[in-house]
Amino acid sequence: MKILITGAAGFVGSKIVEYLRLGNTEVELLGIDNLSRKGSETNISILEKFNCTFVKGDISVQADIDKLPKVDWIIDCAAEPSVLAGLIGGSLDLINNNLVGTFYLLEKCKRDNAGFIMLSTSRVYSINELNSIRFIKKDKSFVIPESTSFPTGFSKNGVAEHFSTVAPISLYGATKLSSEIMALEYHYTFGFPVWINRCGVIAGPGQFGKIDQGIFSFWIYQYLLNKPLSFIGFGGEGLQARDLIHPFDIYTIIQQQIYSPIETAPKVINLGGGIENTLSLSELNHFCSLNIQKDKKIGSVIEGRTFDIPYYSTDYSIANLHWNWKPTISAYQILEEILDYGRNNLDHISQIN
Ligand SMILES: NC(=O)c1ccc[n+]([C@@H]2O[C@H](COP(=O)([O-])OP(=O)(O)OC[C@H]3O[C@@H](n4cnc5c(N)ncnc54)[C@H](O)[C@@H]3O)[C@@H](O)[C@H]2O)c1
């Protein structure tokens, strides 16, 4: 079995390579990455360590994909993953990376009769619908109100797959939703397997934390580097909350999708930490003040940012029902791992931040 991992030098891609290798010493792993993400070049040594052949190439360049050997599966982890991407300047770059690249990969799957696994995002869900829910403030966080009149697809468990995907969802979300639609069409037209995993915030050690992507790592690294931080939007108190999931818990379902697929399971599923692993910025900050520095001053900006949402938590009931899947690594375990990684790699982190 030969598996191509795109974006292999990225945060999730490099972790998936590691777990695939630890789970199967025989599988042939091939990774492609254009190294556009600052710091991704340092992950090439991880790919080598886990015996993954690395090719520098761009998934949005047809020739780069066409010259790759035949494979059995493609796990697509290559993307410009920021919700703010494409806002200033390069919208076309975003579309090339996240959508045109998908076409070339799907064409390769068709040629090779290979399966396609896509890491999609919770950012496919309607921003206005999410903003229409009146989340309530409890202690340091927004929480789901007691209510029986939520929008379709929303419940006390969070956002399910049938929640609205009506625009606006951000240009990033739109490239992902379009890619999902095309992947499903290729599946039904040409018959190769397709699994689409819509992930909430993915967080863990080794992440290149930025303010617009990887917020949990970003916050912890800013503390470690003694750099300024502010609560932005929603009253400037850090009440906005997200669930978080460790890449290992993404791997466990990918592993099933490849090695023991359940053919009748829905093709599109949500994966995320769920309400039990949802933390607000203020709760994240509290973790940092307990573990890193007690008296750090946090700024407050009342005005929000484009595309921001107050709360997102994944309803993963479908994944649980069909794949018997649930997250195994808790939010606070993830924070501990990031902190540990940050303390041991501070020089590297300061160079890429
Ligand atoms: N990190 C999250 O919170 C999160 C949440 C939901 C979904 N996702 C999805 O998971 C996937 C991986 O995200 P990540 O957090 O590892 O991001 P990342 O930025 O760490 O990794 C992405 C990698 O893709 C590479 N890349 C970008 N464009 C490319 C191209 N055209 N050709 C080849 N390589 C390219 C980058 O150099 C980088 O190494 C993405 O598809 C993203 O949309 C991430």
Image: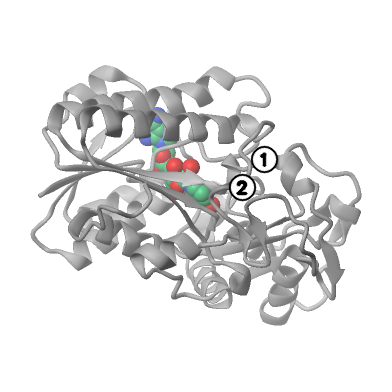
Q: Earlier in the sequence, mark 1 or mark 2?
A: 1
Q: Label 2 is placed on what type of residue? A: Phe
Q: CA distance from mark 1 to mark 2?
A: 8 Å
Q: Is residue 282 left or right of residue 51?
A: right
Q: Residue furthest bottom?
A: 290
Please determine whether, in this image, residue 133 is positioned above or below residue 287.
Answer: above
Question: Which residue occupies the foreground of this view, 19 or 37?
Answer: 19
The residue that disc 2 covers is 163
Mark 1 lies on a secondary structure that is loop
In the picture, measured across the screen, residue 190 lies left or right of residue 271, that is: left
x then y, percent, for residue 22 = 21, 67
Q: Is residue 108 left or right of residue 146?
A: left
Local crowd size for mark 1, using a 10 Å CA cut-off: few (<14), some (14–19), many (≥20): many
All told, the count of numbered labels is 2
Q: Quadrant of residue 321?
A: bottom left
Q: Which residue is mark 1?
A: 126
**Residue lying at 56% horizontally and 61% vertically, measured from the top left:** 315
Residue in the image at 23% along x and 60% along y: 20
C-beta proximity under 8 Å, tags 1 and 2: yes
Q: Position of residue 13 (x, y in %)?
A: 35, 49
Q: Position of residue 290 (x, y in %)?
A: 72, 81
- Element type at marker 2? loop
Ligand 1 image-quadrant field: top left
Q: Mark 2: is the Cβ under 8 angstroms from ligand 1?
A: no
Residue under the image location 71 percent in, 63 percent down: 226
Q: Residue sitting at 87 percent across and 62 percent down?
A: 237
Q: Of the residues shown, which amino acid type is indicated by label 1?
A: Ser
